[in-house]
Amino acid sequence: MNINIREFKRVSIMTVEGRIDSNTAAEFEDSVESALSNSGGNLIFDLFKVDFLSSSGLRVLVTANKKSKSKSGELSICCLSKQARESLTIAGLDVLFQIYPDRETAIGSY
Amino acid sequence: MNPRLLTIQAHHDQIAELCDLILQVAQQVGFDETTAYSCSLATAEACENIIHHGYTGEADLPIAMTLNLSEEGSLIIELIDEAPAFNASERPVQPEWSSDDPPVGGLGLQIIHQVMDKVLYKRIGTQNILTMIKHSPQ
């Protein structure tokens, strides 16, 4: 798994590549914590290059959403890969997140 | 199809090997990419549960997978571990939840039962045997 974070004025974008599963969830969670702290709770996940998303990763996303709200921030997802979309849908969690088709639309919503 | 066997040690970084085999075999026998992915996801969830709850953490203990195809074309994924008995065949009750209080626990078992058409369990000696079946796409 590779993680890249880019900070904009109102929001940060976290781009994740590879597998988000029980092997990588702890590293993912640490990065998310850090990004939420630095962005005031506004965070976009770009999951275009995520080729596997298990419940361990979904839990990090759900927890991040709660933390974002507690900071009066907003968390969203853009550029969902087929696999990430399938995992969110199977778990019934797709309704929980604001999902945008591309980065520009996601950034523009903040 | 000849049964495909693969045994890993109960380490999180080895689960991907099982998933890759399922993705490959499921598509070879006619399942679409999305269904193949969901079967590999269910298997990863079962393995994560075995490691986390069964073996109570990573250990040099086995998780053995057998992949087979029934005469009707169903994909049969069998996982064998040596953890204390745990029956994963019972579909968990999904509690009502709101966007303010989404679930963070029990997702793995929910996913397994959401994806697979049949989930069977038996205990033989010291082994848990979990059988997950996905019916043929035809």
Image (cartoon, rainbow, N blue to C red):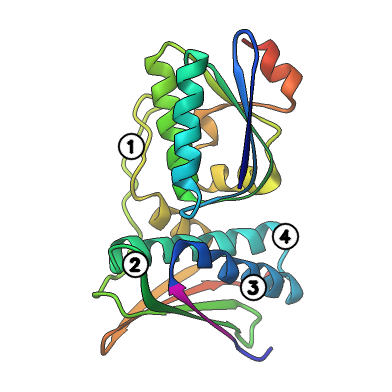
Q: Amino acid type of disc 2?
A: Ala
Q: Which callout, 1 or 3, points to the residue nearer the camera?
A: 3
Q: Which callout, 1 or 2, points to the residue nearer the camera?
A: 2
Q: Are marks 4 and 2 on the same chain?
A: yes
- Residue at 38 percent across and 75 percent down: it is B60
Residue A64 visible in the current orientation? yes
Residue B96: mark: 1
Residue A44 falls left or right of residue B94: right
The residue range painted magenta reads B5-9
Pointer 1 or 2: first along the chain? 2
Chain identity of mark 1: B
Tell me the CA gap for discs 1 and 3. Answer: 35 Å
Q: Are marks 4 and 3 on the same chain?
A: yes
Tell me the CA gap for discs 1 and 2. Answer: 21 Å
Pointer 3: what residue?
A: B21
- Residue at 73 percent across and 70 percent down: it is B27
Pointer 4 or 3: first along the chain? 3
Chain identity of mark 4: B
Q: Amino acid type of disc 4?
A: Glu
Chain identity of mark 2: B
Q: Are marks 1 and 4 on the same chain?
A: yes
Element carrying mark 1: loop
Pointer 3 or 2: first along the chain? 3
Q: Nearer the viewer, residue A101 or A45?
A: A45
Pointer 4: what residue?
A: B33
Q: Amino acid type of disc 3?
A: Leu
